[in-house]
Image: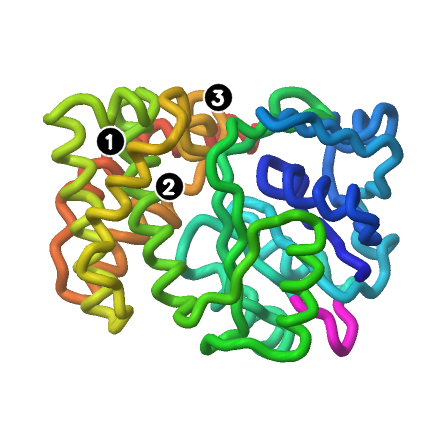
Amino acid sequence: MRIAMYGTGGAGGVFGAQLARAGEEVTFLARGAHLAAMRESGLVVERPEGEIRIERPAVTDDPAAVGGVDLVILGVKTWQVEEAARAMAPMIGPETAVLPLQNGVEAAAELAGALGERHTLVGLCGTISFVVAPGRVRSLGGPNFIRFAERGGGTSARADRILATLRGAGIDAEIPPDIDRALWEKFLFVVSAGGMGAATRSPVGEVRAHAETRGLLEQAMREIYDVGRARGVLLSEDAVARALAFADLLPADGTSSLQRDLADGRPSELEAWNGAVGRLGRAAGVATPVHDFIYRILLPTERRNRGAARR
């Protein structure tokens, strides 16, 4: 399968390397020093279970140089989705599918608006992975998975082919019976844990260890549960309990991309995470005081980082 990995950060690096190692025809799209290092020395993914090294990856910063592909896996940040959708046009053929892996619940709708419903899948992933140096990605272990489906849910011949390709590369992949539920259950966990980690400037092990912060984490999860249910998402009654149990299984030093971006002076996904909870909650008539507080106290840092990025 011809695959374009649009964005070679944590998720793109990990899953793209697995696909390339399995012999799939993968082209990585990257920028700057990361692109230069991959051209010079390849792509290295550090994992507890063993390193993956792609010695001579196909890598570019120009979608037009790639041409038409069977599948685009979109690994950019949520605030880059609109730009990526425009830029990837040269890679989109009549049968091309685009699989978004963003942390949020709106990326697929944004892609469908730009590319059309027939090209767009709904997807999510789970991984604690990040770029540690140009050309080098580190995965801290724990669950690494991709879940996806056609828009509106369900499978198709192309979805089944993608599923087989992902599984053939050793990726934990699944087409869940209810993709909206899967998307919101991840949203419930990632946005709550990520926001709490960023607000407290603490890894997940510390957030979950103290009764006070664990209580706020649970309340934040409950707010997203209530917003999702109000919007017609069939979240299970034990969704919050399972999310808390999942948090207890993660590496104690784990941090979210939101937390790392804010701390490192980069633009983050704050608007699509905690900001989106408040916005969607207001539209549904559901109060979200914890997420509103997290959003407001992180907003000055977010705006400062964005201003610095424009200079």
Gap between marks 3 and 2 measured at Cα: 14 Å
The residue carrying pointer 2 sits among few (fewer than 14), some (14 to 19) or many (20 or more) residues within 10 Å by Cα, namely many
In percent of width and height, residue 123 lies at 51, 60
Q: Earlier in the sequence, mark 3 or mark 1?
A: 3
Amino acid carrying label 2: it is Leu
Q: Residue 237 lies in what quarter of the image? A: bottom left
In the image, the segment drawn in magenta is: 92-97
Which residue is denoted by mark 3 in the rendering?
Answer: 264
Amino acid carrying label 1: it is Ile
Disc number placed over residue 189 in the picture, else none: none
Which residue is denoted by mark 2 in the rendering?
Answer: 270
Q: What element carries label 2?
A: loop
Q: Is residue 311 above or below residue 19?
A: above
Tell me the residue at 24%/25% (across/down).
207
Disc number placed over residue 297 in the picture, else none: 1
In contact (CB < 8 Å): disc 3 and disc 1: no
Q: Main secondary structure of the magenta part?
A: strand
The residue carrying pointer 3 sits among few (fewer than 14), some (14 to 19) or many (20 or more) residues within 10 Å by Cα, namely few
> In which quadrant is the N terminus drawn?
bottom right
